[in-house]
Image: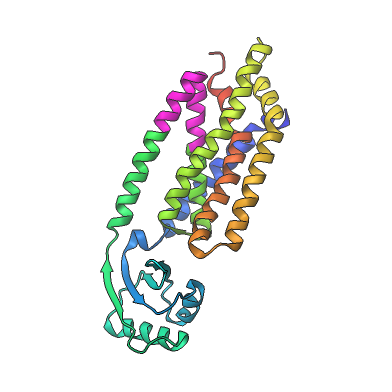
Amino acid sequence: MKIVKHYKIWFALSILVILAGLVMIMVSGLNFGIDFTGGTMLTVSTDRVLDAQEVTKALSDLELDPLIQHQGANDETIVIKTKKSLDTDARNEIRNRLVETFDLDPATKIDGEQFGPNIGEEISKKALISMALASAGMLIYVSVRFQFYFGLAAIITLLQDLLVLVSAYAFFNITVNSNFIAAILTILGYSINDTIVVFDRIRENQKLMRGKPKMEIAARSIDQSLSRTLITSLTTFVVVFFLYILGVPTVKELALPLMFGIVVGTYSSIFIAGPLWALISKDK
């Protein structure tokens, strides 16, 4: 009951974080990755697999902030992406650095090309369409399975999750790339699952607590589903956390927003969704 009793605090906290994030975005913007800004892509074919972290370390003093990927059947091709526009001399400097550091064949060639933000724009467009369709589908599903006010509360809760996550990226200056988009879509599905668990309990308690205030029904439902929500979220978080600690850089880029999303989704399903439903559906 204490959770719902202080719902104004939880709402105010979410609004404060979101507003602060919007201010940060207006002042300094988001740290968009290479997929969204464009830059230079270098391809180096080697005679063996090079560790991406070692390559990053070897090029650290060049201030490229590179994204390192492997290609080819045996991962023997290194792809280096950087936001910087590199001329021929800069590209040769990178090639020479790799040859010296990893004792590669002196005849090793490096191919380079400039690329624009078209890929990022296409990903963003498709992601927005996917989120809009997913949100509409969730609204219809929850409205049919429960009531319209459940669906409306669920969509507002998901919007809060998204805005808080974006705010966290603005605060910590974390790179926004294609993995961030993939993580958002995953988080939306994860968050709605936790929210529906709470709503399902509310629906059952509505029948058992006829005539009781909506806030009281929401409070009991949250208390009954609290342990399940926390255990599920903690288990998922631990798995993703170890992926972040032990994974390669590309895995870490996906795991980081997932960890943020798990925390935010758990918070919203416990502190936001139930009280929001009670307010929206009051006396209806």
- The colour mode here is rainbow
Q: Position of residue 131 (x, y in %)?
A: 40, 39
Predominant SS along the magenta part:
helix
- As for residue 14 lying within the magenta part, the answer is no
- Where is residue 264? Give x, y as percent: 58, 44
Quadrant location of residue 10? top right
Numbered circles on residues, count? 0
- Looking at the image, the residue that sits furthest to the front is 73
Q: Considering depth in this image, is 126 or 235 the residue closer to the camera?
A: 235
Comparing 197 with 84, the one in front is 197
Is residue 137 shown in magenta? yes
**Direction from residue 13 to residue 48 in the image, left or right:** left
**Residue at x-position 32% and y-position 85%:** 92
Query: Where residue 158 sits in the image (x, y, percent)?
Result: 50, 37
Instruction: State whether residue 252 is above or below residue 128.
Output: below
For the residue pair 42 and 21, the one nearer the viewer reads as: 42
Query: Left or right: 245 with respect to 138?
Result: right
Residue 99, quarter of picture:
bottom left
Front-lying residue, 165 or 133: 133
The residue at the point 33 percent across, 55 percent down is 120
Q: Which residues are magenta?
A: 135-158
Quadrant occupied by the N terminus: top right
**Residue 45 placed where, x, y %?**
35, 76
**Residue ID at (32%, 70%):** 41
